[in-house]
Image (spheres, rainbow, N blue to C red):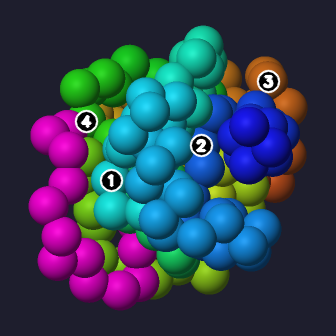
Amino acid sequence: MAYYDDIYEIAADNYGIFTRADAQSMGISDKELSRITASGRLVRLGHGVYRIKHHIPEKNSPYAESVAIVGEGAYLYGESVIAMHELAPTNPADIYVGCPRRIRRNLPTGLTVIHTHSDHLTTYQGIPSHTIPEAIRACAQTMMRSRLIEAVRVARNKGLINATEERELLEDLNGRTS
């Protein structure tokens, strides 16, 4: 099936994820997308979000899927950015996704949407995300300070933040205001 081959090409480079918007841009009708899903080659993850059935999950697949399920403008938020980079112990059962718009549809268990807007966004491994410094700051009220300090040090050792960002984060976490 030619359509499925095209779908596979896109999904293979995107954690196995394929969206209705991808289908529309390729000229695949909703009816054809439903037919491919009914045949079992696509698994519906959420409204307009699918995963190819034979995709082997990668370490970051749950994060990419969560952001895709929330939709346009969504990004990995706070504690989930820390978890993705393995900077500090976090609760692996919850994935936090930030989004500037309100989400009214039902979401999978363990996916928490934080209604917020941030100008401190980037992409890590193809997943829209808070920057690491912003993610650490976002966790100041929910994670232990000692874990956040360790996250700063690990991020610096991994080359994810520079010396200036490390110093500013440590000052923020230690209560100094500038």
Alpha carbon separation for disc pair 3 and 1:
34 Å
Q: Which of the marked residues, 4 or 2, is nearer the chain's N terminus?
A: 2
First in sequence: mark 3 vs mark 1? 1
Q: CA distance from mark 2 to mark 3?
A: 28 Å
Image point 52% across, 75% down: which residue?
72
Residue that badge 2 annotates: 17
* Residue where numbered disc 3 is placed: 158
Is disc 2 placed on a helix, strand or loop? strand
Q: Which residues are magenta?
A: 98-110
Q: Quadrant of residue 114?
A: bottom left
Residue for point 79% across, 24% down: 158
Query: Which labelled disc corresponds to residue 14?
Result: none
Q: Is residue 88 magenta?
A: no
Q: Dividing the picture into quarters, in which one does residue 131 lie?
A: bottom right
On the image, the x and y values in percent for residue 33 come to: 52, 56
- According to the picture, the residue beneath numbered tag 1 turns out to be 46
What residue type is disc 2 on?
Ile
Q: Marks 4 and 2, Cα distance to the nearest angstrom?
A: 20 Å
Q: CB under 8 Å between callouts 4 and 2?
A: no
Secondary element at image label 3 = loop
Question: Which residue is rendered at x = 25% and y = 36% of the image?
Answer: 94
